[in-house]
Amino acid sequence: MSAALLDRFPEVDPRDPAAILAAARVAIDGRIVFTTSFGLEDQVITHLIASAGFAIDIATIDTGRLFAETYEVWARTEERYGLRIRSVHPDADGLATLLDAQGVNGFYASVAARKACCETRKVVPLGHMLAGTSAWVTGLRADQSGTRAVVSPWSRDEARNILKVSPLAGWSRAEAVAFADRHDVPRNALHAQGFLSIGCAPCTRAVAPGEPERAGRWWWETEAGGECGLHVGPDGRLVRSRAPAAEEVPA
Ligand code: SF4
């Protein structure tokens, strides 16, 4: 993706997710993939893609440790929009090696063990999913956490050499909720139980009123920055998503 192409995007309203998706589809040749984890923001983006009929593939990483409620909203979403959401899964040999090394819940033992699990169950499958793809659509919002405060609608994932499109970068959670209410977007039942950010079942808890949105992710860790590796660089540091060139901050 050339810098010249990135330069065209500032003409699009950064707070209009439908316009961002439309501009991405017009400007970018080749396959575009949206990865959903079936949380609120991702459901809004699925609604926008499906309703407008954008030629953007919707896919998910089935880590094998998802909540039952996530599988339920996955099925409900396919039914509502009449589509199939493609899934990728951890490699069987890689998973066996991981479990041999740390046991089935070994990710609680240390940050390194947790990152090894995320690597096997999420990062490697994501790499397979994005192989040969021109652009990656994500549900990141800038105000989800301090580490995501620099998320912008257009950026490059330098580690994967791919354009990253985050249509909801400029939205608040309240705006996403209002949109979902207005359009009757299918929602993960966990949100009503206090879960704001939804990931794997053993690594996600509900948050108390006033807690940061991502406080429920890997809550037992204090030093890792609450990220799983999908949005970090090859050296393990969080990748800022400010176009045109990614910068980094300590995780
Ligand atoms: S979130 Fe937890 S269970 Fe899921 S891949 Fe990461 S460490 Fe493993």
Image (tube, rainbow, N blue to C red):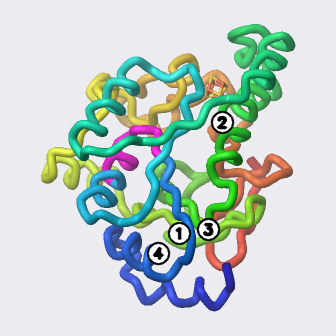
Q: Quadrant of the N terminus?
A: bottom right
Rendered view: 165 above or below 146: below
Under tag 4, what secondary structure?
Answer: helix
Alpha carbon distance from label 3 to label 1 = 18 Å
Residue 102: assigned label: none
Q: First in sequence: mark 2 or mark 3?
A: 2
Mark closer to the chain start, 4 or 1: 4
Give the label on residue 134, or none: 3
Q: Quadrant of residue 117?
A: top right
Amino acid, disc 3: Ser
Decide: few, some or many residues near mark 4? Use Cα within 10 Å; few <14, some 14-19, many ≥20: many
Q: Is residue 62 left or right of residue 17?
A: right
Label 2 sits on residue? 122
* In this rendering, the label closer to the viewer, 4 or 3: 3
| Residue that mark 4 sits on | 24
Asked whether 40 falls inside the magenta stretch, the response is yes
Say which residue label 1 marks.
152
- Spatial distance from mark 4 to mark 1, Cα to Cα? 14 Å
Does label 3 or label 1 sit earlier along the sequence? 3
Q: Label 3 near label 2: C-beta < 8 Å?
A: no
Please state which amino acid type lies under the numbered disc 2: Lys
Q: Nearer the viewer, mark 2 or mark 3?
A: 3
Q: List x then y, in percent, for residue 65.
A: 56, 20
Cα gap from disc 2 to disc 4, whole angstroms: 25 Å
